[in-house]
Every structure is written in structure tokens, then in C-alpha cells.
Image (spheres, grey):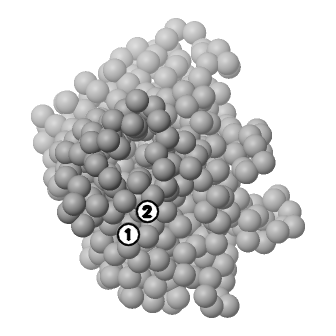
């Protein structure tokens, strides 16, 4: 096999054979294929895509490049997981994992860090004093057995080929490729050895996929690939036109997740979390009535069971469990400045991407890979699309290190929040997603309206 011939054939739209594609990827791992040659192939894939067979081959090669866990080997509770394609103010994982553990499932969750304007679960967890996300696989499995859930970053032992491919994609402009996204996500989840997977495919201004058609295309690709590899999977297409919940920023989102774990969080955060939880219960407990399942899960939030499980998780992973009862122990910024309505009217839009960028500029996210984040800074949004406001009303709180940082965030909010004289039409994108955050359900059988 000549690497240049493989690249040329993919460039010209030909389908690559299983053995040559697998050999190419294995050659990259063992040093026979150079990074610049893999970069050329990734660019060809970006423009030409992957056939169903090629996608399967790439995904299997990533899985087989590292260790595979197997939570199905014993007679313990079913092991399940969730993945989100990213958003702003998305603290769902912090609520979902302990909630499912309290409901009798096991959740071995491997998560990522913030990227661009979107937040990362690991950064949020590390806002909890002492919390460790760098457990090795043996300790990871032990925490799952003891607590019912564990939340860590991807280790070098799981799908190492994915980490190397993603590093190249990140610097060659090939990140936004649906087949490459699908192989990256599903390979890691299959390697976790779980029994069911639910995907939160976000859509809108703050999402990777801004249009519903693209979000549905990605959701179908992910579900089909997962099912073909023997992992039952459902995807929900959810709204990210405006930030999810009220908080944007690491410690602020942990605080809001704790509120949700007590049944006191924002309605949209609870809506998305319960919808994802019901999907997983439906897969592992066939025949369970969806409405009854939702009521049981909501009860675990209301009675404190889920919050108690989160405290156990924090303690087991080296953090301070007292933050669950005393959120004031979380990091806090030295300044808290209100951002007020410049005029009376109706809020038509709260653009998630601009809000996310404001949080990044405050220090809650990264401008470049490897940069530290500030756990204390961020924003709290006090008004939603469709809200009537008066001039001078507080619409947001800016948590910042300096007055200069707060001023820059205020400029972003000027662009993010649109206020007009008349109320928005009920058919606008902002209000449609605001009224129902979960719009579509994608399974191996097809696409249907959620709910």
C-alpha cells in the first residue's frame, strides 16, 4: 500500500477497501504513516465523506487501538451513558449521572473540556474544590461500582487513535465533518462497554449544528453507527438557540446543577435531563411507561436522592461534598455587576453563541488549547426570550475578576440580547425552542417528534 495512492483515491471520491483503510490508520499509530499524510486523508474525507463501510472501518480501528471496558460481564445494574454535541450553559451531565445512579443504573461517564464558546463537563467538575477527573481505569471502575457513577476525562488507554486524529482535525480545519464526528463519539462510547447510549444533539445559535436539517443528519448518522456496532442508541435533538438554564460559567453551572438535583433548577435544564434519563431507562427496562418513569425520576430530584448521590460521587473523587449543602463553598468571582435593559420592550432573542463568547472572554473558557480556565467567573441570565422588560431592569449578572473584564462582557451582551417594542411572534425560532427544548427523537426506526 502506498499512502499517496490511498489519499488520491479518496480525494477522487472512490471508496476505500476495509484492509487498506485499516492498514493506513494502523500505520499512523506505529509510525509508518506520517501525520501530514493522515491530514491529507482527513481533508479528502471532509470533502468526500465516508461510505457506510468506510465509517464502520474507521470506527472499529479507533475502538481497537486501545482497551475496551465491559460492564456487561457481571450481573450488576445496566451500564449506560450520554453524550452531548455541546452548548452554552449545558450542565446536564452533572445532573444526569447521579440521577441515573440514584435510579439504580450504572453510569461510567467519560467527558471532555470546553471547546470554543461551548463549556466542558470536566471544567465544571474541577470547579468543585479537590475534585479529580484524572482517575485511571481501575479506580474509574471501582467508583462506578461503589457510587453507581463516575465522571472522568478520556484516558490514553481508551481509543488513543481518536486523540491523535482529533489533534490533526483541530489544526487542519476538518473538525466539522459528520462522519469524523460520528466515529470519534461512538468509538469511545462502545469502548466504555456500556449497554445503552443516549445522545443530546444540540441545534441552534450556540450549537455545532445551527440548522435542524444538519442536526437531524448528524443524529441519524450517530444512531445508525452505534446500532451497527451493537450499542443500542437514541438521539434527542434539543434547542441551543438560547443558553440552557440561567448560569454560564463553571462554578455557576455547578451551583445550578445542585439546584436541579434538588428539584429546584430551571425548567429547561430539568426538561432536557429528564428526557434523556427516560430514554436510557426505556432501553434497559423495556415496557416501562414513559410517563411513570419521568415521575419516578422527578421524584428522585425532589426528595434529595439524586443530590445525595452527587455528594457521594464528589467525595469519592476527592472533592468537597459539603458544596452540595453549601454551594457558597464553590469559587466566587470578586465582582458581580448587573447588566440592565437599555430600553423597555420585549426580549426577542438571547443569542447563545455571544453569551458563550462573553464567558470565554471573562476566563470561563479557553482562547487556545491547554489554557487554564477560571472556575469562578461567568454570567447569570435573568430574562428569557418572550419576557417583557422595563428600561433599567437587571437582565444579567456578570461575575468577573476586573471591571475591564465586566465591561467587555457587557458589550457582548449588548449584541446577544435583542429587545424590541412588540412581543415576538410565537413562530420565531427563539420562542419555538424556548417552549420546547426537546424537539425530535431519532432511533433506529426513524425520526419522530419528541414527547
Residue at figure coordinates x 53%, y 88% from the top left: 145
CA gap, disc 1 and disc 2: 6 Å
Q: Nearer the viewer, residue 362 or 112?
A: 112
Residue at figure coordinates x 59%, y 53% from the top left: 225
Height in image: 320 above or below 385?
below
Kind of element beneath mark 2: helix
Residue 405 image point, x, y percent: 16, 37
Q: Quadrant of the C terminus?
A: top right
Kind of element beneath mark 1: loop
What count of labels does the image hold? 2
Height in image: 108 above or below 408?
below
Name the residue carrying label 2.
61
Please tell me in which quadrant of the rendered image residue 441 appears.
top right
Crowding near the residue tagged with mark 2, few <14, some 14–19, many ≥20 C-alpha atoms within 10 Å: many
Residue 358 image point, x, y percent: 28, 35
Find residue 65 and name its label.
1
Residue at figure coordinates x 41%, y 59% from the top left: 22
* Horizontal side of residue 337 vs 443, given as left or right: left
- Residue 279 visible from this viewpoint: yes
Residue 267 image point, x, y percent: 61, 47
* Horizontal side of residue 145 vs 37, given as left or right: right
Mark 1 touches mark 2? (CB < 8 Å): yes
Find residue 147 and name its label.
none
The outermost residue toward the front is: 1
The outermost residue toward the top is: 421
Residue 41 image point, x, y percent: 32, 42
Residue at figure coordinates x 74%, y 65% from the top left: 283
Height in image: 337 above or below 299?
above
Amino acid at each position: 500500500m502506498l499512502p499517496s495512492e490511498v489519499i488520491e483515491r479518496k480525494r477522487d471520491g472512490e471508496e476505500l477497501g476495509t484492509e487498506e483503510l485499516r492498514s493506513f490508520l494502523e500505520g499512523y499509530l506505529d509510525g509508518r504513516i506520517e501525520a501530514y499524510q493522515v491530514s491529507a486523508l482527513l481533508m479528502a474525507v471532509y470533502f468526500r465523506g465516508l461510505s457506510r463501510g468506510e465509517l464502520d472501518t474507521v470506527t472499529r480501528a479507533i475502538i481497537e487501538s486501545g482497551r475496551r471496558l465491559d460492564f456487561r460481564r457481571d450481573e450488576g445494574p445496566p451500564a449506560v451513558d450520554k453524550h452531548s454535541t455541546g452548548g452554552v450553559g449545558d450542565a446536564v451531565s452533572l445532573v444526569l449521572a447521579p440521577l441515573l445512579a440514584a435510579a439504580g443504573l450504572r453510569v461510567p461517564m467519560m467527558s471532555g473540556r470546553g471547546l470554543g464558546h461551548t463549556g466542558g463537563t470536566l471544567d465544571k467538575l474541577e470547579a468543585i474544590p479537590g475534585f479529580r477527573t484524572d482517575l485511571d481505569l481501575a479506580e474509574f471502575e471501582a467508583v462506578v461500582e461503589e457510587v453507581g457513577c463516575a465522571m472522568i476525562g478520556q484516558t490514553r488507554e481508551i481509543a488513543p487513535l481518536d486523540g491523535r486524529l482529533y489533534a490533526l482535525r483541530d489544526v487542519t480545519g476538518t473538525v466539522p465533518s459528520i462522519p469524523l464526528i460520528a466515529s470519534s463519539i461512538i468509538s469511545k462510547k462502545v469502548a466504555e462497554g456500556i449497554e445503552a447510549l443516549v445522545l443530546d444533539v444540540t441545534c441552534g445559535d450556540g450549537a455545532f449544528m445551527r440548522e435542524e436539517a444538519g442536526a437531524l443528519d448528524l443524529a441519524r448518522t450517530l444512531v445508525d453507527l452505534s446500532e451497527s456496532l451493537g450499542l443500542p442508541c437514541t438521539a434527542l435533538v434539543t434547542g441551543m438557540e438560547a443558553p440552557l438554564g440561567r448560569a454560564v460559567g463553571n462554578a455557576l453551572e455547578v451551583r445550578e446543577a445542585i439546584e436541579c438535583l434538588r428539584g429546584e433548577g430551571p425548567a429547561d435544564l430539568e426538561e432536557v435531563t429528564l428526557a434523556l434519563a427516560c430514554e436510557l431507562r426505556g432501553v434497559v427496562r423495556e415496557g416501562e411507561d414513559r410517563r411513570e418513569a419521568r415521575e419516578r425520576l422527578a421524584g428522585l430530584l425532589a426528595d434529595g436522592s439524586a443530590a445525595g448521590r452527587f455528594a457521594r460521587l464528589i467525595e469519592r473523587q476527592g472533592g468537597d461534598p459539603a458544596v452540595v449543602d453549601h454551594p457558597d463553598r464553590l469559587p466566587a468571582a470578586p465582582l458581580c455587576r448587573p447588566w440592565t435593559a437599555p430600553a423597555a420592550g420585549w426580549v426577542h432573542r438571547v443569542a447563545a453563541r455571544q453569551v458563550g463568547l462573553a464567558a470565554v472572554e471573562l476566563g470561563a473558557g479557553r482562547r487556545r488549547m491547554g489554557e487554564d480556565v477560571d472556575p469562578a467567573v461567568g454570567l447569570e441570565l435573568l430574562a428569557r426570550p418572550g419576557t417583557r422588560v422595563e428600561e433599567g431592569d437587571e437582565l444579567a449578572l456578570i461575575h468577573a475578576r476586573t471591571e475591564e473584564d465586566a465591561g467587555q462582557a457587557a458589550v457582548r451582551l449588548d449584541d446577544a440580547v435583542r429587545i424590541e417594542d412588540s412581543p415576538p411572534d410565537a413562530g420565531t425560532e427563539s420562542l419555538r425552542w424556548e417552549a420546547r427544548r426537546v424537539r425530535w427523537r431519532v432511533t433506529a426506526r426513524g425520526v419522530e417528534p419528541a414527547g
